[in-house]
Amino acid sequence: MRRIYYVTGTRADFGLMRRTLQLLATNKSTLPGVIITGMHLSPLFGDTWKEVEASGVPIRGRVPTDVEVSTGAAMARVIAQGICGLTDILNADRPDALLLLGDRGEMLAGAIVGLHLNLPVVHVHGGERSGTVDEPVRHAISRLSHYHFVATEGSAERLRKSGEDLGEYLSQAHRGWMKSAPRSFPHDRSFGEILGLIQTVVQL
């Protein structure tokens, strides 16, 4: 059985990936797990780790970080704390793939750790533009990742221009995943394509 871990730091990112993880849990060949960090673990932001627990997706670890201060220095420290905590969990468990979404510091920490531990890193929603500090963080995550699931052809083209060798894999991911709503996968056929792609990643 192949283990796929997802790093989640906020209600927003988990909401986008919850259905995917739940469907992965129904497949006999994959075992998803979640590492909780960031705002999820803060009472100030509602202790939203409880929503992750309620989803039924197994929690594989928790990485507390100081998210209640939003200065640049504090954000940098959160990434450092994330790297330390994620290293301990991922080095001990050695999952078959690490799934990351978007552009937050928690995801950047995951990408750095995954790269150095030689774990296949899968980035969802790379290549997008926001015009904020999140944009270079997103691009950094993409450059540290091994596989890419993108939302638009424009995103794919930006990744290609940045030097990513996307090849056929990305175009398959684009057709199979992102033409279904990323919040949920109502059609088994679409999810079957996604699952096949993820299984391809974890079997390499």
Image (cartoon, rainbow, N blue to C red):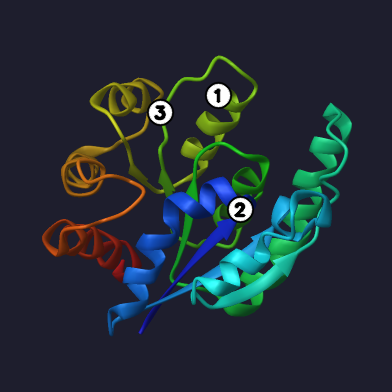
> Disc 2, disc 1: CB below 8 Å?
no
Q: Nearer the viewer, residue 118 or 3?
A: 3
Nearer to us of marks 2 and 1 is 1
SS state under label 3 = loop
Q: Is residue 103 left or right of residue 28?
A: right
Give the distance between the C-alpha atoms of the residues marked 3 and 2, in whole angstroms.
Answer: 18 Å
* Residue drawn 41% across the image and 23% down it: 162
Q: Amino acid at mark 2?
A: Gly
Above or below residue 25? Residue 156 is above
Nearer-N-terminus badge (3/2): 2
Say the numbered circle drawn on residue 110: 2
Total number of numbered labels?
Answer: 3
Q: Which mark is residue 135?
A: 1
Disc 3 target residue: 127
The residue most toward the front is 46
Q: For residue 46, what is the image quadrant?
A: bottom right
The Cα–Cα distance between marks 2 and 1, rounded to whole angstroms, is 17 Å
Residue 192 screen position, x and y as percent: 17, 64
Closer to the camera in the image, 54 or 142: 54
Give the quarter of the figure containing the N terminus: bottom left
Pinpoint residue 61: horizontal percent, then vertical percent. Answer: 67, 73
Question: 57 and 127: which one is in front?
Answer: 57
* Residue type beneath disc 1: Glu
Q: From the image, which quarter does the C terminus lie in?
A: bottom left
